[in-house]
Amino acid sequence: MTDAVIKSQFPAPGQQNARRVAQAVERVSRVFEQRKLRFTKLRQQVYEEIVGVHTSIGAYDILERLAVKGTRLAPISVYRAIDALMDAGVIHRLESKNAFFACRRPEHGFEKGKRPLVLACEKCGSVAEVDSGDIFETIGKMAAAADFTPRVKFVEVSGLCPRCVGDNDQN
């Protein structure tokens, strides 16, 4: 896998730069506008904390980060903002960690049946969304054969990202 692919799928953990956060906020603002939803100041602040890192982040971590910046909120306020962002399709929940990450593949929110496969690195915490191929079709067929109605939105796989696999090879 080339360095360019590694960087595009699994960005280095840590903070995003301000320019990229601003671009992401502008893109999300347009999504909210297109869907005739309100992109409130609180929703923007919560989104900025989520998109500002390349890993998933929990609601209480968001609360702490906002408090450091001078915005003290009740947990329910953050959860409501998170719900609105999830409903708009601009963030996703990493089920295994009860944490949230910014959607980096906005096209899957607009194409019917197009859902990503979520890959989460166990070592550095980075999260990537990749094409799921026919995984969801297979899940649907298997569930139908069992007379089961699935409500799955995402499939997540944990393991090591290419960067961390490379780190292990050097040790």
Image (cartoon, rainbow, N blue to C red):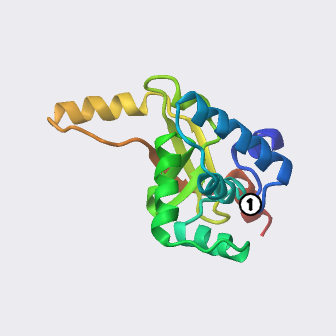
Q: How many marks?
A: 1
93 to 5, vertically: above or below: below
- Which quadrant is home to the N terminus? top right
Please provide percent x and percent y for residue 34.
58, 28
Please provide percent x and percent y for residue 149.
21, 37
Q: Residue at x 66, y 39 (%)?
A: 29
Crowding at dot 1, Cα within 10 Å, few <14 / some 14-19 / many 20+, comes out as few
Task: Identify the residue at the far top of this view.
Answer: 111
Q: Is residue 33 left or right of residue 167?
A: left
Q: Residue at x 72, y 64 (%)?
A: 168
Residue type of the residue flagged with mark 1: Pro
At mark 1, the secondary structure is: loop
Q: Is residue 39 visible?
A: yes
Please provide percent x and percent y for residue 62.
61, 67
10 to 149, vertically: above or below: below
Residue behind mark 1 = 13
Q: Residue at x 68, y 64 (%)?
A: 124
Q: Is residue 97 visible?
A: no
Q: Residue at x 71, y 60 (%)?
A: 164
65 to 27, vertically: above or below: below
- Give the camera-side residue of 65 and 156: 65
60 to 125, vertically: above or below: below
- Give the camera-side residue of 17 and 114: 17
Please provide percent x and percent y for residue 9.
69, 43
Task: Identify the residue at the far left of this view.
Answer: 147
- Give the camera-side residue of 53 and 72: 72
* Residue 61 position by quadrant: bottom right
- Which quadrant is home to the C terminus? bottom right
